[in-house]
């Protein structure tokens, strides 16, 4: 039994930091979480704009109640406190027609988006994936999906493009076949999977972060400190013993703990928080290879009417000439995100990092996206009340990129430093975004418990 006097310091109150913090307090460990921002949630933080709840990009709980994030909530027995809306009305848009997204293998046979002969070509690829093992998927982690689909016809290829946008918010070239296989496995109903997704019914994906934070702070001795800027991790005799925290612009404070967990991307942590001389050049080189990112330009639109009269929730245009790659009718997922009589739509497309930070390019993309939406929904601009465009970069190891997937990423520990742990989507885990972060926490917390028990 671990002593209740043990204290764990966690840097970062994003999904991974909150997940491992909540699981540890569930085991009787006191945790202190330091978050540099003014509220919890990390990349899932939402804001209120003109009385609408806007997420920082489109976030979704993958595979609904089969996700790693939901497993964490079940482990804590707080899953019933989270009300989820199902996201299952997903469609492709091709040549002025809507086509239902297939929820299972049999749906492919009736997928009218593809000619009958093409459906069997797609199934020949999909079926072996759906029944593969994790070990078999790992053998394909070095290969981009585009290598597997390059011999398909243009229309079948656009189908895979749309799946990649839904599951990864990226293009086939950046998606590892192994990660794609694991996604298909989790969606296979014959193996207990689901193609349905979840989103908090009350609006704002950070509802999940707030629930985890509430759980942590309900335990005496555990706390979350926002605006808590950590200057460095204190390492003494090859062991992490605490942190140095900024108290104000002129002074700092030493906080001691029995171990330290970092939930920010590893390559940022070793640059900003740890003495480089301790780590060694080879280690730093291996970690820096994870310094990858995905960039997106997205626009939120406030509307006076629901232009999607069939109540579709997500539409993926599959034409190569279409700039917009995803249209998300957030108000059709849950009305809670918008005030009465108004509706919220989010549309976007992946771009390069330089494009995301070019104000001129951002303006061009914004107009192209509006044009694309207007062609699908002619009444769009007549119903437009306001628009808010943002370009953002996911500062992470791109967990799906070939060669940087699953077990090829950063381990949760460093051999020569005891009591220092890393969690998050740049560490060993599979899935993307919040699911990778939660999966990392599930894999890491037994190691933390073992260390505390032996320390």
Image: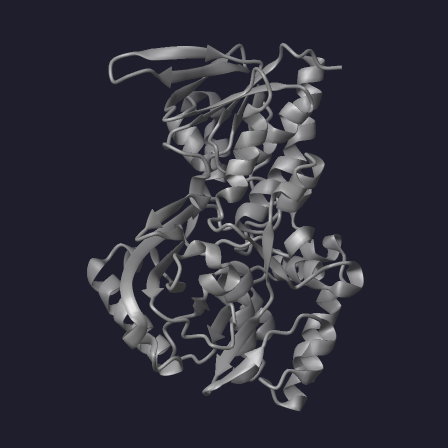
As drawn, 124 above or below 272: below
Residue sitting farthest toward the front:
340
Q: Is residue 141 left or right of residue 347?
A: right
Which is more toward the observer, 285 or 180?
180
Q: Is residue 232 left or right of residue 405?
A: left
Q: Is residue 133 visible?
A: yes
Name the residue: 48% across, 51% down: 203
Q: How many marks?
A: 0
As drawn, 431 above or below 175: above
Residue sitting farthest toward the left:
360
Name the residue: 52% across, 61% down: 333
As drawn, 438 above or below 332: above
Q: Give coordinates of residue 216: x percent, y percent.
A: 57, 27
Quarter location, residue 27: top right
Quarter location, residue 369: bottom left
Q: Give coordinates of residue 246: x percent, y percent.
A: 34, 18
- Quadrant containing the C terminus in the rendered view: top right
Q: Is residue 161 left or right of residue 378?
A: right
Q: Give coordinates of residue 393: x percent, y percent.
A: 37, 50
Q: Give coordinates of residue 424: x percent, y percent.
A: 54, 39
Name the residue: 36% across, 73% down: 323
Q: Is residue 349 visible?
A: no
Name the residue: 49% across, 80% down: 93
Q: How is the image coloured?
A: one colour
- Quadrant containing the N terminus in the rendered view: top right
């Amino acid at each position: 039994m671990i002593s209740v006097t043990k204290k764990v310091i966690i840097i970062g109150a994003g999904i991974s930091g909150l997940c491992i913090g909540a699981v540890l307090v569930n085991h009787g460990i006191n945790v202190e979480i330091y978050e540099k921002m003014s509220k919890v949630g990390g990349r899932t933080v939402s804001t209120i704009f003109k009385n609408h709840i806007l997420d920082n990009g489109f976030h979704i709980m993958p595979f609904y109640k089969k996700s790693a994030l939901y497993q964490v909530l079940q482990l804590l027995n707080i899953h019933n406190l989270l009300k989820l809306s199902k996201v299952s009305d997903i469609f492709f848009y091709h040549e002025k027609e809507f086509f239902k997204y297939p929820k299972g293998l049999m749906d492919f046979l009736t997928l009218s988006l593809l000619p009958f002969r093409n459906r069997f070509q797609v199934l020949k690829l999909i079926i072996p994936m759906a029944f593969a093992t994790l070990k078999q998927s790992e053998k394909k982690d070095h290969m981009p999906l585009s290598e597997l689909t390059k011999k398909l016809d243009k229309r079948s290829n656009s189908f895979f493009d749309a799946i990649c946008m839904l599951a990864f918010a990226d293009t086939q070239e950046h998606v590892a076949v192994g990660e794609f296989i694991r996604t298909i496995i989790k969606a296979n109903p014959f193996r207990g999977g689901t193609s349905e997704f979840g989103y908090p019914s009350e609006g704002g994906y950070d509802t999940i972060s707030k629930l985890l934070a509430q759980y942590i702070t309900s335990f005496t001795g555990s706390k979350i400190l926002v605006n808590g800027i950590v200057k460095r991790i204190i390492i003494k005799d090859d062991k992490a013993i605490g942190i140095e925290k900024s108290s104000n612009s002129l002074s700092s404070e030493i906080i001691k703990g029995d171990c330290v967990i970092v939930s920010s991307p590893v390559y940022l942590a070793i640059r900003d928080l740890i003495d480089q001389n301790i780590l060694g050049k080879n280690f730093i080189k291996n970690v820096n290879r994870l310094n990858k990112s995905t960039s997106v330009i997205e626009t939120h639109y406030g509307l006076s009417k629901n232009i999607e009269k069939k109540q579709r929730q997500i539409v993926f245009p599959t034409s190569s000439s279409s700039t917009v790659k995803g249209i998300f009718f957030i108000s059709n997922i849950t009305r809670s995100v918008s005030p009465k009589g108004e509706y919220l739509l989010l549309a976007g497309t992946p771009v390069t990092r330089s494009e995301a930070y070019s104000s001129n390019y951002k303006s061009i993309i914004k107009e192209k996206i509006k044009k694309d939406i207007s062609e699908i929904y002619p009444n769009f601009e007549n119903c437009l009340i306001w628009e808010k465009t943002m370009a953002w970069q996911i500062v992470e190891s791109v967990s799906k990129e070939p060669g940087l997937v699953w077990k090829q990423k950063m381990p949760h520990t460093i051999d020569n430093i005891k009591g220092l742990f890393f969690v998050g989507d740049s560490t060993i885990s599979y899935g993307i975004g919040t699911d990778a972060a939660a999966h990392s926490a599930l894999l890491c917390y037994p190691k933390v418990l073992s260390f505390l028990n032996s320390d």
